[in-house]
Image (cartoon, rainbow, N blue to C red):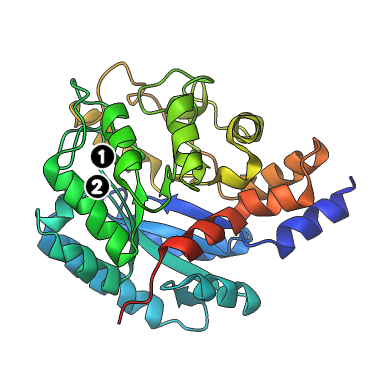
Amino acid sequence: MNATLDTDVYRSSIVWDMTLPWIGFGRPELRPAVLPRLKACGYTCVSLTMATDEESLEATTQAIAHERAHILSRPDLYVLVETTDDVRRAKAQDKLAVAMHFQGTNALARNLHMVEAYYRLGIRHMLMAYNQKNAVGDGCHELTDAGLSRFGRDLVAEMNRVGMLVDVSHTGYRTSMDVIAASTQPVVFTHSNPKALWDHPRNITNDQAKASAATGGVVGVNGVGIFMGDNDASTEALYRLVAYYRDLIGAEHVGLGVDFSFDTESIIRKARSSAAQYPSGGGYDKELAFVQPEQVADLANLLLRRGFSAREVEGILGENWLRVTSQVWKALP
């Protein structure tokens, strides 16, 4: 397949990255350059992390208000995502669609009514526990492997009712499997790699990936080098992850959650200063490598050259996220 055809497939596709660390993950003064860079790379939609399990309810609501105001103030550049139609509209109008999510549930302050409140503010997916134990269950780096709590079961039901997509990245094995069993809607891993290819506690087992796919969910490949291999953030390593998941669960259940860091130095300092959240032995003390946004187009070309169909590539780039969000997200009265 020639380079022109490769480029045409990428340019015509909806390119949707479900995970861009944002609040709490880097110096604010560096953020203004990030979204224009993604747009220049051909992205159609990106989802911003607006809170982890470290942010309070007050800080989170203020951050959401600030980000909404910024996005809405530039209608020439951005589309604030509330429905999947907003993503399609952004593609048609050559704009960047911006969605929002949480990596953790502590910003709820154990108040289930906050699920709908946050949904109305634009939060469209939320993962259950960020590495450590919280009120919902255990994270992937916790010493125990306890399952979903009673509060967690009620939370999954409320997210299903409201239409917020349930994410079990960063979540402990048993808790993630309990969530998948409890949910009546598709459950996703927005940014989690296969443990079978690289045995890191942050990665997931084959049965976790299969269980997500069985709900109709999508597993997004993660672009952090220590989760891809020996701190390997090459396009070849990214290809291996996609190819593995295609063979395991089908191309229709594979997506992108690149987890790009726009401030590597801050991420490394954060990891080194929080041993409980980022335990020693996990490789967090390295000069971490990250897949760069420009590599996504290279990945698409590589997939096509190695036998993936154009339809499969379109799905992996973004159509699979469109399918699952179309099924889960709701228009609230």
How many callouts does the rendering have?
2
Query: What residue is disc 2 on?
Result: 104
Residue 187 is labelled as none
For label 2, the SS is loop
In which quadrant of the rendered view does residue 207 lie?
Answer: top left
- Residue at the limit of the structure toward the right, as seen here: 2
Where the N terminus falls, by quadrant? top right
In which quadrant of the rendered view does residue 37 lie?
Answer: bottom right
Write the residue at 20% across / 37% down. 148
Write the residue at 13% across / 47% down. 151
**Foreground pick, 154 / 259:** 154
Instruction: Name above or below for residue 219 compared with residue 200.
Output: below
Amino acid of disc 2: Gly
Instruction: Name above or below for residue 268 compared with residue 48.
Output: above
Query: What residue is disc 1 on?
Result: 130
| Res. 55 in view | no
Q: Are marks 2 and 1 in contact (CB under 8 Å)?
A: yes
- Spot occupied by residue 238 in the image (x, y as percentages of width and height): 60, 34
- Spot occupied by residue 310 in the image (x, y as percentages of width and height): 77, 51
- Taking the image as shown, residue 127 lies to the left or right of residue 302, namely left
Write the residue at 16% across / 64% down. 114
* Other-residue count near label 2 (Cα within 10 Å), few / some / many at <14 / 14–19 / ≥20: many
Instruction: Name above or below for residue 133 compared with residue 216.
Output: above
Write the residue at 45% across / 40% down. 212
Amino acid of disc 1: Tyr
